[in-house]
Amino acid sequence: MGHQKAIFNTDYVHYKYLEYSVYEGDFKDVCQDILSVHETSNALIAFGKTLSQKLFSESTPDDLKDFEEITGDKYFPQTQRDVFIWIHGKTIGDVFDRARSIDNALPKNASLKLEKDGFVYHDSRDLTGFVDGSANPQGEKALDAALIPSGPAKGGSILLTQQWNHKLDMFAVMPTTEQEKVIGRTKPDSIEFTDENMPENSHVAKTDIKGTKIYRRSTPFGNLQEHGLYFMAFSCETERFTKQLQSMAGSQGNYDRIMDFSTPVSSSYFFCPSEELLKDIAQS
Ligand code: HEM
């Protein structure tokens, strides 16, 4: 079965992230819009567990969960939402037009809870100045990491979204060598530290866990008043995320030092259904 093409499409540099609360409704129009081909924009839709079970019944992945807060030395709040929309466009105007069209196609009781505008920052860097995405799997390995391989949810994906607010001034006052220890890679050219030089509490050390490959599509968002990373990543199973997040929070051992400079303020899991499942709704 075919996955939603936006997952792997990197042609565009302007993004919008939308999270809605909506208990139930008719999703026919919005699925038609998501599936329609536009030259200037792409869009993806994903659903929280409650709505997924209503819309897709047994095609909902067994391991899909509502996000539960994670506590350790650091904390991940839960703000589980029902619908996630991701729009990519060639220009900010294209993104805005598509967002209006999709928002109008959603059920009238859908309540917009989060809207963030994302952008590609220089050569795909996070606002801290570090390249984000270097260790992402490529080609077939990306498909293996992101997509559910078999069963009724085949071609779908589990999606984690999180808004992170950065304290950029606090990060920027550190010398580059110290910033690199926080991440576990060099800043100009994103070279990973060797095992012997890798600090135990660096971001790479806390997330590079065997058997937990995910496919990340985060971008920076925001303006001068509020900015950070809108983290989003696709996985064939939920557990890969929970292992990485528990490791970052310091549920056992050190917490991830990146959490001294950035704070997660939202977290949701969604099911990103295959195009076939969306077609079933669009044609219903
Ligand atoms: C403030 C939030 C975050 C920032 C700024 C950030 C930034 C980065 C950067 C700069 C890298 C190194 C380059 C690369 O391989 O992409 C990286 C790697 C990585 N990050 Fe994050 N990240 C954040 C949150 C997260 C979260 C929440 C997760 C997991 C749920 C995560 C999972 C990963 C993984 C799996 C890697 C690759 C590790 C490896 O195999 O080398 N990151 N991140």
Image: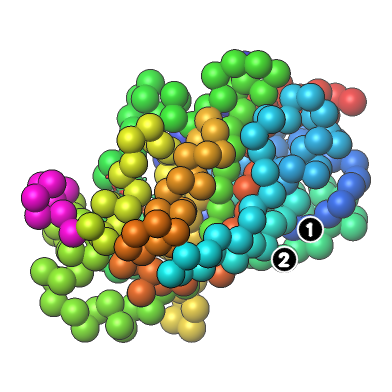
* Outermost residue to the front: 252
Image quadrant of residue 166?
bottom left
Distance from disc 1 to disc 2, alpha carbons, whole Å, reads 7 Å
Left or right: 146, with 205 as reference point = right
Q: Which one is nearer the viewer's eye here, 127 or 35? A: 127
The span shown in magenta is 192-199
Mark 2 — residue? 113
Question: Is residue 237 placed above or below 106 in the rendered structure?
Answer: above
Residue 208 can be seen, yes or no: yes
Image quadrant of residue 16?
bottom right
Q: Which one is nearer the viewer's eye here, 245 or 274? A: 245
Locate residue 217, reporting x and y percent. 44, 46
| Residue plotted at (26% across, 51% down) | 205
Locate residue 132, reporting x and y percent. 32, 53
Left or right: 210, with 225 as reference point = left
| Residue plotted at (40% across, 61% down) | 250
Label 2, secondary structure: give it.
strand
Prevailing secondary structure class for the magenta stretch in the rendered image: loop
Mark 1 — residue? 21
239 falls in the magenta region: no
